[in-house]
Image (spheres, rainbow, N blue to C red):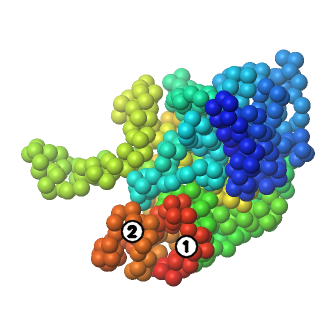
Amino acid sequence: MCGIAGVLKPSGHEVSEDLLKQMGLVQQHRGPDNLGLLARGNLGLVHNRLSILDLSPAGNQPFFDGKHALVFNGEIYNYKLLRAELGAAGIEVTGSSDTAVLFGCLVHRGVERTLKALRGMFAFAFANLQEGEVYLCRDRLGIKPLHWTHRAGCFYWASEVKALAAVLEVRPDPVRTLFATAGIGDHMNENTVFANLWHVPPGAYFIFRAGQPPGAAIRYYDILDDIDSSYYKELDRMPGNAVVDASENLLDRSVRAMLMSDAPMGIFVSGGVDSSLIASMATKANPELTLLTSNVIGKFSEYPSAQRLAAHLGRPLQSSPFTPEMILSDLVATTYHYEAPIVTHTNAIPFARLAGLARSAGIKAVLTGEGADELFLGYPWLLAERYRRWLLLPVNFIQALYRIVPGLQSYLLPGQEETIEGFLSLLAKGFERQRHRERGWEAYGFLDRRLIRDHYQTVQMLHEHLVSLLHRNDRMGMMASIESRFPFLDEEIIRFAVNLPLRWKSRRSFRFHDYKHPFLIDKWPVRELANRNLPIELTRKRKEGFPMFGHRYMRVKPGYFREGYVADLVGLTVGAEDHLMRTEPSSFIAKLVSVDVFGRLFERRESQSKITERILEYVSMTEN
């Protein structure tokens, strides 16, 4: 895990090392072990190294052979296989890092062929100096970030927006920033909350050519490519124990692959099923791994479950205590690294402290349980959505009657139709959901149409909800120079999950499982696999989702917004603010505070200490 950045100017223009150094220093937290620069005419590359494989200087970047150059962020888990393939073809790779193998593949096999062969998480810039081209490439799910912009004929890119803001004018987009209150800020695959600044989309690459306008992204992979009617039918014919066996084989291989490291590793655990299962399988392969957890003090604490896991595995547990008041003291610094308003995941704040604990313990990389709920539909509301038509049968019947008379439904049941706010939120995201859903339903066209929507939920969760979790894990981990790895997001597990019939993802049960879905077992393969590895009190633990005292528990005093970013953005007068405070839910007001903090940081460029002082003066926490 590292940080990368770079510039491509029109021919005849020089890139200075001073400019590159400015970009690199701003994101040095992503890779404190080495800052590497390459300036060759109109091309400049920057690399912040977090050394995990090949700790020697031979692993320092940029890689450069006179004709090609590379800066790479991430891990290639099948690099040894790729190295053997290059060797069989008579191609020698110098050095023992996965970067060296990636460089050899790109030079000798080309970009697209290499991308399709890679297994791992990555974002990289590869330059062909002879052709005057730079390729910006991103992994299949967008685990590693990569932003880009085009200004006055020049291309700029970086792992973090802050690196671009160090050398360019970068400002929040007012529309997307305002609609971040609806949670879009960290959910977008293409747009960002900054004006004229974009993500390289997951599973895609750009080709930048000096002096030419940017072309469209070239997609080399889509989750939809994994949907296969033959594989679906094969899984549908399997008995239950064979499905669990297949899950175990795939996950065990993934865990072992992601334990590759020449630096100390750990595991982030919550006591929940997913991270506990990963910890159980990983400690069998490496008994020396460190367990780390966040102890959210108070009624939301899952610390006792994490302790039970540690006792079961016979491993010590290190914990990072977190009190509600820490939200207020840490909100500004965390937002600075989050690079979006913290609305969806206020637990990013204790997550950042947990990453700091890992770093203080000398750890550089951790395994996490992220992804299981998206792949195997482990969120309670997904089950409720699937059975919604039955749960709401009386309401649906009445609505059907109201539809007989035109306009009667909207008159008697206001709010049933799409709101203008909802439409504008979709517009701000570029209709990513709608465009992807159309193609997704086509990919599942071999199924009965009544089943397509429910099967597509897995793809939609990977395409949307997972994006925000990966954003959180990357930004908060790298805030403390910690790399997060995700065994559930192995390519073969994803293919398995998007083709797995629904009857194997959730199962009926005579046992009361969760009050949200009493007699339904969610993410059934994961829980069955957990039954083979964990004590029953952990396998039956219901989904909690890193709970904490979030926006609902923040109380904002009148006067906070005066002369602030939100007030300027929407023209919030003193009278309007007074009305807002008296009539709107406290959770919505707290989300506006998060947006205001973001705007003060990235639009007004106020100091972190000044904003924090205002937070502590006007905002308090309650446990009710």
Q: Residue at x 68, y 59 (%)?
A: 479
Question: Where residue 418 sits: x, y (%)?
Answer: 27, 49
Q: Callout 1, which amino acid?
A: Ile
**Label 2 SS:** helix
Where is 316 relative to 196, above or below?
below
Which quadrant of the figure has residue 113? top right
Which quadrant of the figure has residue 414? bottom left
Q: For residue 112, say whether it is visible.
A: yes
Left or right: 454 as drawn, with respect to 315 = left
Q: Residue at x 44, y 35 (%)?
A: 436
Left or right: 410 as drawn, with respect to 519 = left
Q: Can you name the residue that lies furthest to the front here?
A: 12
Pointer 1 local density, CA inside 10 Å: few below 14, some 14–19, many at least 20: some
Question: Where residue 394 sits: x, y (%)?
Answer: 23, 53
Read off the residue under disc 2. Answer: 567
Pointer 2 local density, CA inside 10 Å: few below 14, some 14–19, many at least 20: some
Q: Where, quadrant-wise, is the C terminus in this rendering? A: bottom left
Q: Residue at x 54, y 47 (%)?
A: 467
> Who is closer to the viewer here, 193 or 212?
212
Q: Callout 2, which amino acid?
A: Ala
Question: Where residue 72 sits: x, y (%)?
Answer: 73, 39
